[in-house]
Amino acid sequence: MAVTLAQAINQALKDAMEANDRVLMFGEDVGKLGGVFRVTDGLQDRFGEQRCFDTPLAESGIVGTAIGLAMYGYRPIAEMQFDGFTYPAFEQIVSHLAKMPNRSRGTVKLPVTIRIPYGGGIGAVEHHSESPESYWAHTAGLKVMTPGTPEDGYAMMRAAIDSDDPVIFLEPKRRYWMKSDAQLPVETEPTHRSVVRREGTDVSLFCYGPMVRTAMEAADAAADEGWSLEVVDLRSLAPLDTQGIVASVERTGRAIVVHEAASTLGMGAEIAARIQERAFYHLEAPVLRATGFDTPYPPAKLEEYWLPNVDRILDLVERSLAY
Amino acid sequence: MSEHGSDPTVAPRSGDDPRLLLPPDEPVHLLDPDGTEHPDADHPLDLRDEQLRELYRLMVVTRKVDREAINLQRQGQLGVYASCMGQEAAQVGSAYALEDDDWIFPSYRELGAALVREVDAAGLLHLYRGTWLSDHDPYAHNFGLMSIPIGTQALHATGFGMGARFDDNPIVAMTYFGDGGTSEGDPHEAMTFAGVQKAPVIFFVQNNQYAISVPLDKQTAAPTLAHKAIGYGMPGYRVDGNDVLATYAVTKRAVERARAGEGPAFIEALTYRMEAHTTSDDPTRYRTKDELDEAAKTDPIARMKNLLLARGLYDDDLEREIDEQAQSVATYVRDGIYDADHGDPMELFEHVYVDPSGHFDEQAAQLRAELDGSEGGA
């Protein structure tokens, strides 16, 4: 039976809450409604109002109380309703969640998972399509994960909840309805490792979250042109699997990073830097970036011009191969 | 069914008169500066003679260590220090009203509360020396890390209190912030959440009249800070913050109420920051010597000494004993801080993650090599 990404994450939450009664799920509208994307559907019915509850509408409050609950001994999962509404919680995440374990010299552990539906492509109104991953990946003390498949949606969510470190779990909202034949529960590779989704010999595409499918489609289209693209799903943005990235570049000699987030200081900048530091002599061409533009996320009717798509990727493939 | 039927636009009123949440006209005050007592039936004192002496002792030790910290800063041993001089009664009285299992979530000015909890004061001051960010185990004293971003720790107290409530664990979390902190968003969210969750949390505000240089009338138009509490559905208490008996009694009442499952409370303790905001501040730019002289008349320590004298609980032996103890703690702090080493720089990488797989391997190796190089005298 087919399972969607949203269902896979939902099942992971359910199984984790079943396995450990210290796991709590809370946020805005996660109770009766089951979350605006229904990712928490059924949890309150099953586990009661104390383990899955609606909070007041205040994101800093959600993260700050998650920290207090974790200090007390719970394993909180906090939902931020949308990417663009995580910013009120920025201070709690950056100044406390990320730093308190270090500040306490390891005496305080904060096993908190913050779930954030992110990215565009669903025709949403302003502030509902953002890609804030660089903020979190830039912040020492956080782990940042993002699944690109329903299998990873399940397995990485379980890993995030089991992690004794705080995890920012970015859910590619445009892929919530992406289906797979996965049998749950499923185990996948360790979360800090990237995975080669498609082997290729000409160019490596480094992607994550919502762009994994786009990159796979680009690889299909490229094959028609006679180009063999390797698709590497990074999965974890902090830490970043430098080894896996370098290994792929050593195979292909060419690299393109694909992400929705704006280009400047996006993950592509870091990945390009690591590649040139470690695989300089393997490169046949400069590392290129197929990303969103350095503009605010556009109005819904214009997002198709903004988001990286198969054509933008293939243009860069052509440029890369021309070197 | 009311006359409005089921009209959802007409909010139902809960049973209790919400005006009961408002603060009394006058702050609770049990002790005059000259030591005269004002018993209050709502705030009966259950303190034995020994405990009265203990409260006094804790305040004296706090002031002594506070002064030592300022001296250490002047001597270049601390980078900066935020004094709590003048606020000893607010901190000591409130912290003393807690049980050992209760938790405290402090800001960065809570030396007095820390000493009640027997937190190693030298360890705390490492934050200000810059040797390490903290050197106390919060779980050993139920005393959270000092929190510098204003008011942010209030949310941690609320989360902690929620956890205790979920577990039917009869403990209370108390958080400290200041008059400036009441303007921040996080205490507001913390009180909103605590109200809704009926979490056993005490929001203890030391209104020391200034947020660095900004006086209270530029901070809020609320009639008093305690009036804010009604907006969160919790009682707002007001207390003379330089009266250690009153801060103890008012806190005790709020704590017992929270422990009994009746939810959070807000306490505004009226006090005065006798020192600069921090050692980097110059208060002569924003307040007068006359104002300071006036405030000094309400000194919490002198007041408590007058009470002990009036009750016949104070003599030369006690004075000597307390002075010696204060000196000994101050010396201990000085010894712990003076020229204290920062320890192994490799510790920078040690506590960032429980599982550091994949993080900064090469950077740690780089620092290791730099250290080895400098040790080798290259």
Image (spheres, coloured by chain):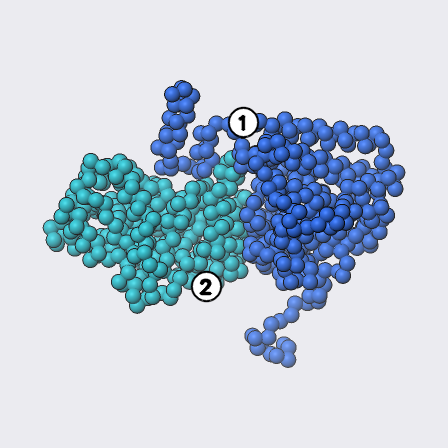
Chain colours: A cyan, B blue
Considering depth in this image, is B277 or B335 the residue closer to the camera?
B277
Q: Amino acid at mark 2?
A: Leu
Residue B23: x and y, percent? 72, 60
> Outermost residue toward the top?
B376
For discs 1 and 2, the disc positioned in front in the rendered view: 1
Above or below, A299 against B322 in this view is below
**The quadrant where residue A308 appears:** bottom left
Determine the image quadrant of residue A127.
Answer: bottom left
Give the residue at x 83% y 49%. B32
The disc label shown at residue B244, or none = none
Query: In this rendering, would A50 be left or right of A267?
Result: right
- From the image, tell me which residue sits under label 1: B341
Give me the residue at 44% from left, 38% from top: B353
Label 2 packing within 10 angstroms: few (<14), some (14-19), many (20+): some
Q: CA distance from mark 1 to mark 2?
A: 55 Å
Q: Amino acid at mark 1?
A: Asp
In the picture, measured across the screen, residue A39 lies left or right of residue B205, that is: left
Query: Closest to the observer: B214 or A161?
Result: B214
Q: Is residue B305 left or right of A110 when viewed as pictured?
A: right
**Closest to the observer: B326 or A68?**
B326
Residue that carries the numbered disc 2 in the rendered image: A33
**Protein chain holding label 1:** B
